[in-house]
Structures are given as structure tokens and as C-alpha cells.
């Protein structure tokens, strides 16, 4: 190994360190030049003054597919608006940055959008933790931010929510769906399991409170680190508690792992379970669970954060022909987010004064493929029948195929809920 | 009430048993090469993803596992050849050992990102081969898959014993690890021994990965936790002591599952802290002495 | 003598040797370059520069430990992350000046990192590196449990952003220059010579009566201080810290930077600037995964074929 030899005071060393310093300075100047050139290019290519819509969504990591669908929804909305004259005569232009899978990459992405592209309107971030981290930046720059996935209610408090709006079902909505399900199956008590995210804690608390108002008791709540894959202790606990129902929020493959272990246990397999926002709505994932255990995916309940309206079917067709995917609430909520924003800008009569645009947002009364959006004073969307409700499905396995039957809300239901313990309707 | 705890313990022991294979590999490599393989987790990762790949080819389970072991054996040897200069393969000099550890760490980083680029960031799960449950007693169940994997791990340990203690080659390995100069003097081929040991060590890690990949899901970031666990087990069992790893794995599984039952979030941290304390009090581990046995 | 005369006398004594003059000039030149780039470009360039500041300090702190005392830490993200977390927690709880919080974070990280490092000295060298890795993972899990995946975000207090980007940038630049000067003069001082002698021949050092253990412990504390300072600054300019700061890949970065750049202070600095620049710009054209892949491959190549880093390649070129 090279030994640092400071005893050598000879000329060679002096010239080496001189050259090293020179090289360093040259490199730094090159960096400056590159950055300068890049920056210069950015500012001179602004041609017809489009209104920039920054989109921060995960395009790498586990949630890349979902993040891409959000972007698809934004694109559909922007294309529609631009083909109908734009906003106040200006076209909309999307600027995308990858939120990545860590909060640090999310913060970097937001910095690029706000400091480099100077966006004044933003869709995202996707994850609630990232929204929280990015809020100081967007709030101080008065960027109007539309949340189309993040559900954390704790974000919607003044003064930081001044420019923040949400067009997707918030955590209170998750609790609403969970309690509707408990009432539907006549459960008197339940347990709640989730990953250790702030939003999951919020949903748990709101579910406990809402359930209590409806005479239902949540008897046990447990949180797992998101990187855990071994749920045997939780399942063992459930077998000894024997609750009427189990509610689970586990994202990604954790939900799959849990459901596998849950269904593999002959005791818990008989207890009705509601998977909120789970990957199990993907038929291939459900099939992998079904293949692993004898009674696999039979009669498992899935809670989705989508709300179907008269526009959902047509939107689904547009999604299918443009991107090859069926109706998806990520796309629908993103689409609604952009539409609501565009309408607010038009209402305000300006796109440069974001404070006025934010005020105009409060007058939103819009029906889109993701629901009927009206904002509460805290900038959350109104929850309830006729607005945003969520949807509950149940999986039925027949002849090796998995079917999803809608059992709630009543207007959209095409089947009745079946009790996994008996195989008979409730 | 107890059935939950007992169920957790059985699961933990099975889990510890499978991971002790990986630990045995780490121990074996250290015993021969005197170097800590900081890329051991990367081979766990490779094992898991290879098993996933071979599963997609619809190969029967045993063929799948044998292929995983063989492939990793050769991949490991190839990596060793490419990445570490021969003179550093076996060294007692701390500075050289540091270089080896850093290089292995870089190798593990490279592997993680190759896997990420090839398979994406999403977790994958190797579907189970065995359905249903095995009833242990009363209300306590273990899935058939994990039961099979545990028995397989035990079988592999028996195989290891046969190789190391009943074969001439194994004798050479043990002789080399106990007294290198003497072994060289009697004509033992150092190159073959080192290569074989490294290949065997990392394929044990890969086997762990492929067995656990069907019980838990794996993604490109997997392997680091398992590297730490392997290190923990090796510390319990004594570094360089391959069968100490078996004991260490069982102890790990037991302790981990008990803490997991009562404090799920803290289980991993608790074991790590115990290990750290052990390292401080008895740096050579509970069961073993350094450089002594293989 | 007036204070000014005393200062200039001390300064001229420090800058006696040509080598020292060049080095100080070099450090000041780097500071000037950063300042110039900041004034010319502003905006997003500030973030790139601040990231460089954090990683230069981080890499240099690791290099100090490794090249100066021969101790390998595979878990240097530990003091880095602790510095970040302590400064964030102190701010959120006590609402002190954010820059003061950064220093408190640095001190806290120094204390904890140094103590943990000191406790590993008894271990066999091969064990020490991985024991520190294990400990960084302990903190990874602990902070994940305590603060969740979201960690701590602390950019706004009562609706007002806690410090402007230019304030944070100037703060970073100042601590960078001062730290580099301190570390350089430490290395060429009598104390630094002692350390070098100890590393070169510990047996002989013990024979003269120098307590090798004591010096190794001191280096651990110093190294942890600068790593924690780097981590505190990193948390400060992003207004955020979470458990991912303890990821193994974060422990690997300073190692790659120091190895690729070279063992001297300037070598590591160069490696940090180069690799951080790459990590900020390459992902735009390729992806973060490819950038990390590149890091790993470059580290392996350098260790295999040019163990002295780019620094040694330049020296060879000049022969």
C-alpha cells in the first residue's frame, strides 16, 4: 500500500502537490462549465411559455409500476386539456422526476423540480413521508401541490396545507372502508395489523375511533417494520385471540407474504380478513398465494381506495387503449388531480399567482373517473356516499381461476359477501 | 396461550437451522483463508434469484437446488479469481485482510445492483413446492415447506461432516486450516483447497437463500441482514468451527423467535446487541477458539 | 506584541514549508471554486455543492481512520447517521439555532462513534471492520423502529423555513474549509507524525513507550466527529433524516471515495468530489443503480490494479 511519506521534502513532492491542486481546480472549473451550460440550456429553451406541471412519482424501486400509472393518468389529463385549448390559452407541460425509493431521492427530485425547473404546480409526491419531507421546500416556494396517492391526514393542517390539496381517499377514508366492512359482515370485534408507517398508525387510530362509534371493538393492534417478512408471531397471536375479523394494511410483497402465512394456518384461514390497498388486486399475485396453500385466496376481502362514477368506465377504456391497463385508481385520481387544478387556474384567471389559484381550488365541485371531488376546509376531499367512498371486493376461486366480486358500495355491488368459515353468504 | 409461543419457537429454530448453513460457509471460508467474506450476503442473494430463475424453467425441486449449488460454486470461484489477487487469498496481515474485506464489500455492492438492474426492485417470491402444514403438537403448526427445508439443511450438515471428516480431501482441508506450513510440506495442494473451500462456502450461502426465498420474499437489497445474522451465528458458534455454526443457528433461532413473539419490532436489534456484547466479552465466540478447528 | 502580529507570526510559522503553502492554497482554492460556482449558478447547483461538502467530510473522516491508524470501519455510516439524527432531534425538541444543532450533532456522534469504535479495538482486525458494520445495522433498525420509514423532517418551524439555502451553503463552506485545514495541519504536525510512526511500526512504537491503544482511540473520536459533522450537515441541507442514512451502501460510499481517490487528504478529497459529482449527474442519463454498480466496479479495479488510487496514477504519470 502507498505510504504517506511526509519526510520527503524534495522537489518531486512539491511539484506533485502543486499539480494535484491544479488538477483539482481544473476539474472544478470543468464542473462549473458543465453545470453552467446545462443551466443556460434550460433557461433559453422556454419557447411558448407552457405552464409547467411537475410530477414526482416513483419510477424505480418496488412501486415503480404504480408510480408509472400515476404518470399515465397525468398524461391523459394533460393531453385532454391541451387538445381543448389548454389553460388560459397556455398549454400544460409535464416535468417528471423520479421519487425513488428513499426519502433522500424524493427530496432531491423535489429540489430539481422547484429549484431547477421552477415549477409552480406539482402532482405528488407519492409517499406520505416524502410529502412531509418535501413540504418545507414547496411551501416556501408557494407551489400548489396535489396529492393523488398520499393519504396522511396529519399533513392537512394550517399553515402548511395552504397550497396542498388531495384528490384521493385519505386515511379517514381507509377507516371508513374498514368500518363499513365490519358492519357488513356483522363483526363485533377485530384486530388490526399494519406496517410501521405513520399513515398506518393514523388509519389504525381512526379505525378504532370510528369502529367504537359503531359499537365495534378493535381488541389488538400490531405494527411490523416494513422490512419484516416473518409474521408467524402475529398469526400465532390471532389464533389465540380468535377475533371476528382481521384488518390488514401491508404494501407490496409484505401483504403477499402475510396472506400466504395467514391462509396456511388452518385456524386463521377461517377468520374473515380485509386487505386494504394490497397487491392482491393483481391477479397474478393472488394466483401465487392461491397456489401456495390449499384454500389460498378463497373468500379474502380486498379494500380498494377507488370510487366508481359514471365516468369510470369510459376512463377505463381510454386507459386500456392508451396504456394497456384496465381502470386503475392511481390513474383516475391523478387525472382528477390535474383536471381540478386546471379548473382552479381558469377560475382564478391567473397561473402565476399560486395563492389565488389555491383559493380558487376551494370552490371545486367536480365529478371525474375517480370520484366526486369537493374539498373540506382542511383541503381533504369529502368522504361519504356520493363523494369518495372506496370499494370492497371479495375473491372467489372457481376451477382454479380467481374472480373479484364487488360487494360494496351497494350501488356497485354485484354479489353478496361470503363467510370464509362457512362458505355461505352472511 | 402457549401454543403461539411454541409455534413461534419452532418456526425460529427452523429458520435458524437454514441460516446456519450460510454461517457454516462463512466459518469455513474464514477457517481456511483467514479472511472474512463480506460478500457472503451477495451469494445468499444470488442463490435466491437463481432458484427463482430455475423455478421459472419448471425444473423439479431437487434439480433446482443442485443447479443453484453448482452454479454458485463456480460463480464464487470465478469471482474470487477475478477480484482478489492470489497473494491475498490467504493472509494473516491485517492491512491485507482489510483490502480483501473492502474488495468483497465492493463485490457485494456490484452484485446487488446487477440484480436490481436485471430483476427490478420489486420483491419476488419463489412459490412453495409443498402445500399445507405439519402438525407438531396441539395447535402448533409448521408449514410443510419450512419443515422440508429444515430437514434438508440437517442432511446437508451430515454431508458436510462426511466430506470434512470422512474423506481424504476433507482431511487435507482440516490439516491445512490447523497448520498451513506442515500441510504444504506434506504436499497438499493449497490452490485446490482454497478454491474448493471458497466455492463450497458461498454455495452454502446460496442454498440458504434458495430455501428461504420460498418462505420469505427476496429482493435486490436482501442479503445484508442475512450476512449480519450469519456473522452472529458464527460468533455464537465460534469462528472457524463449522459445526459450531449448527449450534449457533439453533440458539439464534430460539432467541430470535422468543423476542419476536413478545416484541416483534425489536427482535433483530436484541440479537444484534447480544452479539455485540459477546464480542466484547469473549471475542472468539462462545464455543470456539480461533484458528483451531474446522 | 499585538494580537494581529501574533497571528501573522503564527501563520507564517505554519506556512513555512512550501508543501504547506501549496496545500493551504489548494484548500482555499477549492473553497473559492465552490463559492464561484454557487454565485454563477445558484439554484440546483447549490444542492450539488452541499452534497459534495457532506461527502468530502464523510470520506475524509473515514480516510483518517483507515490510512492514519490502519483501522477499517465497514460501518462508518454509524457516526454519520448519528450526527444527522442528533442534530435533527435537538432541533425538533429544543428549537435552537440549526447550525448550533449541527455542532451538537457532531459532538454527539463523536462521543457515541468514538466509544463504540474504541470498544472494538480488542477484536481481531478482521473482526473489527465487520463488528462496526453490525453496529451500524443496530442503529439502522433502532432508528427505523423509533422514527419509522419517514424519519424526521424539520424544515419548517411555525410556518417559517428554518434557514435559507444560502445560509446553509455558507455554513457548509466554512466548516469544510476549517475542517480541511484542521485535518491537514493535524496530519503534518508532530502529533500527526507520531500517528504515522505508530501505524508504520506499532511494535517499535510500543517499545518507545507510546500507548498504541490510546492513539487508536483518539483517532476514532476525531474520525467520528468529522463523520458526524458531515451527517449533521447532510441532514441540515435536506431538512430531513431517516433510517436509510444507516444503509450499508452509505457506509460503502466513503470507502469507495477514499480508495479511488487515494490515501492522502487531497486524494480522498478528489475521490469524494469526483464520485459525488458522478452520483449527482449520472443517474440523470442512466440510473442510480448503474451509478452504484460503477462505484463497486471502479473500487475493485482500483484495489486490484492501482491500490494507491487515482492519486498514485497521477504521481506515476509525472515521473
Image (cartoon, rainbow, N blue to C red):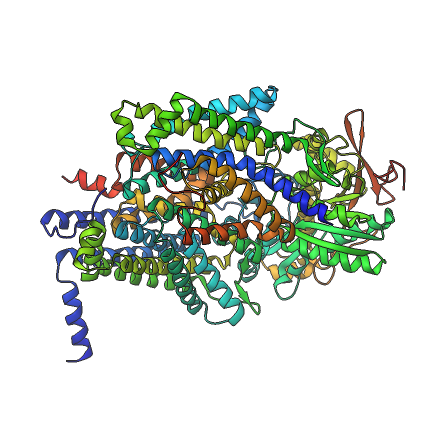
Residue C161 visible here: no
Q: Is residue C298 left or right of residue A44?
A: left
Query: Above or below — where is A316 with respect to B192?
Result: below
Of all residues, the one furthest to the left in this rendering is A10
Of all residues, the one furthest to the bottom in this rendering is C1
Of all residues, the one furthest to the front in this rendering is B166
Picture quadrant where residue B108 is located:
top left
Residue C42 visible here: yes
Query: Above or below — where is B123 with respect to C157?
Result: above
Residue drawn 21% across the image and 54% down it = C198
Residue drawn 47% across the image and 24% down it = B162
Q: Position of residue C120 (x, y in %)?
A: 37, 53
Nearer the observer, A40 or B227 = B227
Nearer the observer, C76 or A200 = C76
Q: Position of residue A328 (x, y in %)?
A: 71, 39
Q: Is residue B13 left or right of residue A117?
A: right
Q: Is residue A390 left or right of residue C296?
A: right
Number of dots carrying numbers: 0
Q: Position of residue A420 (x, y in %)?
A: 83, 38
Q: Position of residue A236 (x, y in %)?
A: 71, 45
Q: Quadrant of the C terminus of chain A?
A: top right
Q: Quadrant of the N terminus of chain A?
A: top left
Amino acid at each position: 500500500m502507498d505510504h504517506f511519506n511526509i519526510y520527503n521534502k524534495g522537489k518531486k513532492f512539491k511539484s506533485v502537490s502543486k499539480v494535484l491542486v491544479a488538477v483539482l481546480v481544473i476539474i472544478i472549473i470543468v464542473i462549473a462549465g458543465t453545470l453552467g451550460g446545462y443551466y443556460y440550456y434550460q433557461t433559453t429553451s422556454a419557447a411558448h411559455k407552457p405552464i409547467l406541471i411537475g410530477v414526482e412519482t416513483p419510477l424505480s424501486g418496488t412501486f415503480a409500476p404504480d408510480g408509472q400509472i400515476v404518470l399515465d393518468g397525468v398524461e391523459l389529463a394533460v393531453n385532454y386539456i391541451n387538445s381543448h385549448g389548454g389553460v388560459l390559452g397556455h398549454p400544460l407541460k409535464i416535468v417528471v422526476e423520479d421519487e425513488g425509493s428513499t426519502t433522500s431521492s424524493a427530496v432531491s427530485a423535489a429540489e430539481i423540480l422547484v429549484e431547477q425547473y421552477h415549477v409552480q404546480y406539482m402532482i405528488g409526491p407519492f409517499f406520505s413521508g416524502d410529502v412531509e419531507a418535501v413540504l418545507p421546500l414547496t411551501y416556501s416556494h408557494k407551489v400548489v401541490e396535489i396529492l393523488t396517492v398520499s393519504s396522511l391526514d396529519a399533513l392537512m393542517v394550517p399553515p402548511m396545507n395552504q397550497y396542498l390539496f388531495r384528490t384521493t381517499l385519505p386515511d379517514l377514508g381507509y377507516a371508513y372502508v374498514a368500518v363499513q366492512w365490519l358492519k357488513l359482515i356483522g363483526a363485533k370485534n377485530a384486530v388490526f395489523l399494519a406496517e410501521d408507517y405513520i399513515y398506518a398508525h393514523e388509519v389504525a387510530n381512526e379505525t378504532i375511533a370510528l369502529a367504537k362509534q359503531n359499537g365495534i371493538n378493535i381488541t389488538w393492534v400490531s405494527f411490523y417494520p416494513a422490512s419484516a417478512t416473518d409474521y408467524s408471531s402475529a398469526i400465532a397471536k390471532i389464533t389465540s385471540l380468535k377475533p371476528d375479523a382481521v384488518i390488514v394494511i401491508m404494501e407490496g410483497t409484505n401483504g403477499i407474504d402475510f396472506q400466504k402465512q395467514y391462509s396456511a394456518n388452518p385456524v386463521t384461514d377461517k377468520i374473515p380478513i380485509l386487505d386494504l390497498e394490497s397487491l392482491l388486486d393483481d391477479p397474478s399475485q393472488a394466483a401465487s398465494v392461491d397456489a401456495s396453500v390449499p384454500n389460498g385466496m378463497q373468500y379474502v376481502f380486498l379494500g380498494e381506495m377507488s370510487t366508481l362514477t359514471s365516468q369510470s368506465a369510459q376512463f377505463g377504456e381510454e386507459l386500456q387503449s392508451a396504456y394497456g391497463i384496465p381502470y386503475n385508481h392511481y390513474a383516475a385520481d391523478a387525472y382528477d388531480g390535474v383536471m381540478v387544478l386546471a379548473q382552479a387556474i381558469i377560475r382564478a384567471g391567473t397561473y402565476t399567482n399560486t395563492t389565488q389559484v389555491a383559493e380558487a381550488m376551494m370552490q371545486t365541485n367536480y365529478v371525474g373517473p375517480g370520484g366526486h371531488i369537493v374539498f373540506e376546509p382542511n383541503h381533504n376531499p369529502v368522504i361519504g356516499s356520493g363523494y369518495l367512498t372506496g370499494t370492497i371486493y371479495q375473491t372467489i376461486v372457481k376451477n382454479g381461476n380467481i374472480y373479484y366480486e364487488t360487494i360494496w358500495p351497494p350501488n356497485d355491488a354485484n354479489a353478496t359477501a361470503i363467510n370464509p368459515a362457512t362458505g355461505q353468504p352472511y | 396461550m402457549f401454543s403461539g409461543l411454541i409455534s413461534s419457537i419452532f418456526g425460529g429454530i427452523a429458520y435458524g437451522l437454514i441460516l446456519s448453513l450460510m454461517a457454516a460457509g462463512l466459518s469455513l471460508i474464514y477457517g481456511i483463508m483467514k479472511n472474512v467474506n463480506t460478500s457472503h450476503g451477495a451469494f445468499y442473494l444470488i442463490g435466491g434469484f437463481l432458484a427463482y430463475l430455475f423455478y421459472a424453467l419448471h425444473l423439479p425441486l431437487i434439480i433446482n437446488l443442485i443447479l443453484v449449488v453448482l452454479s454458485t460454486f463456480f460463480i464464487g470461484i470465478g469471482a474470487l479469481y477475478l477480484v482478489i489477487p492470489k497473494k491475498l487469498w490467504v493472509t494473516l496481515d491485517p492491512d491485507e485482510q482489510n483490502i480483501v474485506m473492502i474488495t468483497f464489500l465492493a463485490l457485494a455492492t456490484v452484485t446487488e445492483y446487477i440484480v436490481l438492474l436485471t430483476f427490478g426492485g420489486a420483491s419476488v417470491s419463489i412459490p412453495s413446492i409443498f402445500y399445507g402444514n405439519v402438525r407438531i403438537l396441539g395447535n402448533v403448526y409448521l408449514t410443510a415447506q419450512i419443515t422440508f427445508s429444515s430437514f434438508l439443511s440437517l442432511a446437508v450438515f451430515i454431508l458436510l461432516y462426511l466430506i470434512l471428516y470422512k474423506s481424504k480431501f476433507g482431511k487435507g482441508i482440516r490439516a491445512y486450516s490447523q497448520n498451513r506450513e506442515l500441510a504444504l510440506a506434506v504436499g497438499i495442494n493449497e490452490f485446490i483447497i482454497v478454491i474448493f473451500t471458497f466455492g463450497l462456502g458461498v454455495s452454502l450461502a446460496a442454498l440458504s437463500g434458495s430455501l428461504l426465498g420460498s418462505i420469505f420474499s427476496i429482493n435486490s437489497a436482501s442479503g445484508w441482514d442475512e450476512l449480519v445474522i450469519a456473522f452472529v451465528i458464527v460468533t455464537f458458534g465460534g469462528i472457524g468451527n463449522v459445526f459450531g455454526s449448527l449450534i449457533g443457528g439453533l440458539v439464534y433461532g430460539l432467541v430470535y423467535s422468543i423476542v419476536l413473539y413478545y416484541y416483534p419490532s425489536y427482535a433483530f436489534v436484541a440479537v444484534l446487541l447480544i452479539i455485540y456484547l459477546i464480542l466484547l466479552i469473549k471475542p472468539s465466540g462462545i464455543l470456539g477458539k480461533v484458528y483451531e478447528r474446522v | 506584541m499585538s494580537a494581529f502580529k501574533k497571528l501573522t507570526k503564527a501563520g507564517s510559522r505554519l506556512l513555512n514549508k512550501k508543501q504547506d503553502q501549496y496545500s493551504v492554497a489548494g484548500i482555499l482554492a477549492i473553497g473559492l471554486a465552490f463559492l464561484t460556482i454557487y454565485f454563477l449558478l445558484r439554484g440546483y447547483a447549490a444542492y450539488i455543492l452541499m452534497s459534495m461538502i457532506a461527502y468530502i467530510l464523510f470520506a475524509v473522516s473515514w480516510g483518517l481512520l483507515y490510512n492514519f491508524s490502519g483501522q477499517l470501519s465497514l460501518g462508518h455510516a454509524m457516526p454519520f447517521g448519528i450526527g444527522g439524527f442528533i442534530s435533527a432531534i435537538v432541533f425538533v425538541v429544543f428549537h435552537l439555532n440549526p447550525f448550533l444543532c449541527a455542532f451538537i450533532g457532531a459532538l454527539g456522534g463523536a462521543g457515541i462513534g468514538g466509544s463504540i469504535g474504541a470498544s472494538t479495538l480488542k477484536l481481531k482486525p478482521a473482526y473489527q471492520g465487520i463488528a462496526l458494520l453490525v453496529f451500524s445495522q443496530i442503529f439502522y433498525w433502532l432508528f427505523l423502529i423509533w422514527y419509522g420509514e419517514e424519519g424526521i423532517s424539520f424544515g419548517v418551524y411555525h410556518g417559517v423555513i428554518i434557514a435559507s439555502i444560502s445560509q446553509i451553503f455558507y455554513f457548509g463552506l466554512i466548516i469544510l474549509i476549517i475542517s480541511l485545514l484542521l485535518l491537514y495541519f493535524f496530519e503534518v504536525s508532530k502529533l500527526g507524525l507520531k500517528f504515522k510512526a505508530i501505524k508504520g511500526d506499532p511494535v517499535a512504537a510500543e517499545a518507545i513507550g507510546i500507548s498504541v491503544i490510546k492513539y487508536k482511540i483518539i483517532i476514532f473520536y476525531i474520525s467520528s466527529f468529522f463523520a458526524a459533522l458531515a451527517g449533521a450537515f447532510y441532514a441540515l441541507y435536506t431538512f430531513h433524516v431517516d433510517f436509510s442514512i444507516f444503509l450499508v451502501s452509505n457506509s460503502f460510499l466513503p470507502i469507495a471515495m477514499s480508495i479511488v481517490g487515494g490515501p492522502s487528504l487531497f486524494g480522498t478529497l478528489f475521490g469524494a468530489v469526483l464520485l459525488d459529482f458522478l452520483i449527482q449527474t449520472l443517474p440523470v442519463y442512466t440510473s442510480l443503480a448503474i451509478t452504484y454498480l460503477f462505484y463497486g466496479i471502479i473500487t475493485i479495479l482500483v484495489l486490484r490494479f492501482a491500490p494507491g488510487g487515482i492519486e498514485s496514477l497521477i504521481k506515476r504519470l509525472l515521473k
